[in-house]
Image (cartoon, helix red, strand yellow):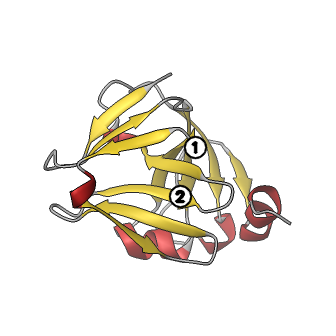
């Protein structure tokens, strides 16, 4: 399904050709520090484009990934793998998609004890994530 949405102030618009309806949560320390809690994102593959590029900023948070945000309002937009390019976009950005299935959690080994989700989901440790998604 194609997804379209925008940041809080509307300066950056995101268009994703293929939005997974499978919602994932990342508990890694970087995601939690970046947003104050776990990251809720959806896999959008490589075909993602943006309007308002002069307001789009990225931060290279590791050798393999970067995070995108709006320079004007600070909205967190995406986590992107550098090679091969793969976008995980903040689920709440898409105006036209609301029927996600929360079905997986990553970096479960870094989840702090002060919160829990009631849903039963698949879980991956950090090592399992690296083995699955990063090139060998």
Q: Residue at x 54, y 29 (%)?
A: 18
Mark 2 and 1 residues: CB-CB less than 8 Å, in contact? no
The C terminus is located in which quarter? bottom right
Residue 36 drawn at (x, y percent):
35, 70
Q: Which mark is residue 80?
A: 2
Of residue 75 and residue 109, the one placed in the foreground of this image is: 75
Instruction: Using the numbered discs, state the Cα–Cα distance from disc 2 to disc 1 in whole angstroms.
Output: 9 Å
Relative to the observer, which residue lies in front, 59 or 40? 59
Looking at the image, which is closer to me, 94 or 52?
Answer: 52
Question: Residue tagged by mark 1?
Answer: 46
Going 51% across and 32% down the picture, which residue do you hit? Answer: 19
Location of residue 47 in the rendering, given as x and y in whole percent from the top left corner = 53, 38
- Residue at (45%, 24%) from the top-left corner? 2
How many neighbours does mark 1 have within 10 angstroms: few (below 14), some (14-19), or many (20 or more)?
A: some
Residue under the image location 50 percent in, 21 percent down: 1
Q: Position of residue 25 (x, y in %)?
A: 54, 53
* Neighbourhood count class around disc 2 (C-alpha, 10 Å): few under 14, some 14–19, many 20 upward: many
- Upstream in the sequence, badge 2 or badge 1? 1
Q: Is residue 1 above or below residue 119?
A: above
């Amino acid at each position: 399904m194609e997804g379209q949405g925008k940041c809080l102030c509307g300066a950056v618009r995101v268009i994703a050709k293929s939005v997974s309806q499978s919602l994932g949560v990342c508990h890694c320390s970087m995601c939690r520090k970046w947003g104050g809690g776990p990251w809720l994102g959806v896999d959008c593959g490589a075909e993602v484009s943006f309007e308002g590029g002069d307001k789009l900023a990225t931060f290279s948070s590791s050798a393999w990934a970067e995070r995108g945000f709006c320079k004007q309002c600070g909205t967190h937009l995406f986590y992107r793998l550098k090679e091969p390019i793969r976008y995980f976009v903040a689920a709440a950005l898409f105006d036209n998609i609301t029927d996600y299935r929360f079905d997986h959690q990553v970096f479960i080994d870094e989840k702090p004890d002060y919160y829990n989700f009631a849903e039963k989901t698949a879980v991956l440790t950090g090592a399992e994530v690296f083995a699955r998604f990063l090139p060998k």
